[in-house]
């Protein structure tokens, strides 16, 4: 490799280390890394900003932007608070029943929205309900973070790594539903069983507190009914357009932006209110990451790694799929799964082509998605949703330590990845 290629590798590794160790904010690390790549001429402006293969993936950026705006408007209606109180009442104050309902709501919401947004909305309400029932909130928050990562794996928009995989692999919203959603249902059943065992000490029932929660009126949580129905209507149309992509041929990013635009234009929500919930740091982080990975493609580093990977697997699709699944889970436990998937996607694309490009070879994409999404549960820094939950807990003076999260996360990851192994093997490789 050339000197520039080696310099780009060094810059990428240093940036990755800063992101993993959180020495500096990950956005600063990603922007700094992207700047260095441009400075050493590992990439240039045309390739970084305008190339479909080596530049910023604007489909990913604008899909996230559109969905964040829609969720920002939906948040103002109070619908998430309504769901949480409804769940507590349906559980009749029984802690385990409450956890089951909350994790199911979280998983389902994460399948439709991104998991970071879901935990941001659900976690504050969890504090309210747990306080009224005199419950330790930590197990509920940990379970919700993990449920968001599992549920988010089922759809294209549920977890940021899936958006990257779909863009690189030419996969549709329906592809994720057909290939991953059935498995995720099984994994959620297993996860609920694990919650019963792992958090058994937290399920202490207080009949007096339960009576108080039953007295709450969830309808009072709805702040604007008209806006709620308008938001739900737009969200339903957007989700339908995702599903009908093979017929309509509109990219998910276009659908999300159109939905956001219609929602803001048709309601009394101001532009400032609509964009207030947009996670701009997340979007900028993605942009910097894409520039860095594109630089590795431009300098030939990704090509060399792809050749080595193809040579190591020697056309053994089954071996490559299992290795990718477990290696992705292990690596996503150590570092954030977003930069990991952004780096691996071009390599997996080459592996898919080397194994026929379609049919059973697509199992490699599902292995990458499952490994990254489920592996993100293993540690407190494995997924963005985990970091967000720990931050919310700290701000509310009920901190969750790295090990407190990780000791449960390792169990959940091992069990869910183990269940995914025979699923991939018998559905695609046997």
Image (spheres, rainbow, N blue to C red):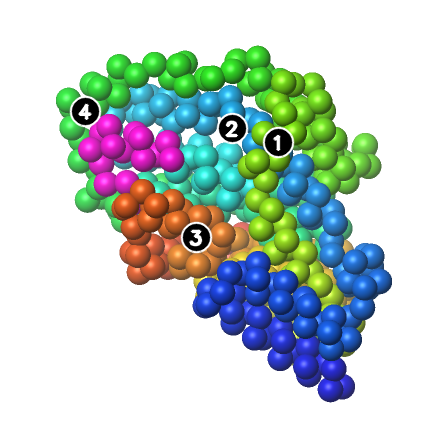
Instruction: Please report the residue visible at 39 percent of the width from the left and 38 percent of the height from the top.
Output: 123
Number of the label disc, if any, that sits on residue 307: none
* Residue at numbered disc 1: 272
* Residue at numbered disc 2: 75
- Label 4 or label 1, whichever lies nearer to me, is 1
Q: Earlier in the sequence, mark 4 or mark 1?
A: 4
Cα separation between marks 4 and 3: 30 Å
Instruction: Please report the residue visible at 63 percent of the width from the left and 50 percent of the height from the top.
Output: 283
* Residue at numbered disc 3: 387
Q: Main secondary structure of the magenta part?
A: helix
| Magenta range | 124-139
Q: Position of residue 365 (x, y in %)?
A: 65, 56
Cα separation between marks 4 and 2: 27 Å
Do labels 2 and 3 touch, CB within 8 Å?
Answer: no
Above or below: residue 243 compared with residue 201: above
Number of the label disc, if any, that sits on residue 209: 4
Q: Position of residue 65 (x, y in %)?
A: 65, 41
Identify which residue, 101 or 227, lies in the foreground.
Answer: 227
Q: Secondary structure at mark 2?
A: helix
């Amino acid at each position: 490799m050339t000197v520039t290629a080696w310099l780009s590798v060094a810059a990428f590794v240093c940036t990755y280390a800063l992101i993993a160790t959180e020495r500096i904010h990950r956005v600063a690390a990603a922007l700094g890394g992207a700047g260095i790549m441009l400075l050493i001429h590992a990439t240039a402006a045309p390739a970084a900003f305008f190339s479909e293969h080596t530049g910023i993936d604007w489909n990913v950026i604008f899909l996230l932007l559109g969905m964040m705006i829609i969720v920002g408007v939906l948040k103002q209606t109070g619908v998430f608070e309504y769901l949480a109180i409804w769940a507590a009442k349906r559980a009749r104050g029984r802690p385990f029943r409450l956890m089951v309902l909350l994790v199911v709501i979280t998983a389902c919401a994460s399948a439709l929205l991104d998991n970071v947004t879901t935990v941001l909305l659900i976690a504050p309400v969890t504090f309210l309900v747990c306080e009224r029932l005199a419950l330790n909130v930590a197990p509920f928050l940990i379970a919700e973070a993990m449920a968001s990562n599992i549920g988010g794996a089922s759809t294209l928009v549920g977890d940021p790594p899936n958006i990257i995989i779909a863009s690189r692999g030419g996969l549709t919203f329906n592809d994720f539903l057909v290939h991953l959603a059935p498995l995720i249902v099984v994994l959620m059943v297993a996860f609920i069983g694990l919650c019963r065992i792992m958090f058994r000490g937290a399920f202490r029932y207080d009949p007096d507190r339960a009576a108080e929660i039953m007295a709450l009126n969830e309808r009072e949580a709805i702040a604007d009914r008209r806006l709620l129905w308008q938001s739900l209507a737009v969200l339903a149309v957007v989700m339908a357009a995702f599903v009908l992509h093979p017929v309509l041929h509109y990219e998910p990013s276009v659908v999300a932006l159109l939905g956001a635009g219609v929602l803001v234009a048709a309601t009394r929500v101001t532009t400032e209110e609509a964009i207030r919930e947009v996670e701009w740091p997340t979007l900028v982080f993605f942009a910097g990451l894409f520039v860095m990975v594109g630089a590795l493609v431009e300098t030939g580093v990704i090509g060399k790694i792809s050749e080595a990977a193809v040579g190591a697997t020697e056309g053994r699709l089954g071996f490559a799929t299992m290795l990718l699944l477990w290696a992705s889970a292990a690596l996503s436990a150590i570092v954030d799964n977003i930069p990991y998937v952004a780096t691996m996607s071009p390599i997996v694309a080459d592996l898919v082509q080397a194994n026929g490009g379609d049919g059973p070879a697509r199992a490699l994409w599902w292995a990458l998605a499952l490994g990254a999404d489920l592996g993100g549960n293993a540690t407190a820094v494995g997924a963005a949703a985990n970091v967000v939950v720990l931050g919310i807990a700290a701000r509310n003076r009920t901190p969750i330590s790295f090990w407190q999260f990780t000791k449960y996360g390792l169990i959940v990851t091992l069990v869910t990845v183990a269940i995914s192994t025979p699923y991939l093997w018998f559905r695609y490789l046997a």
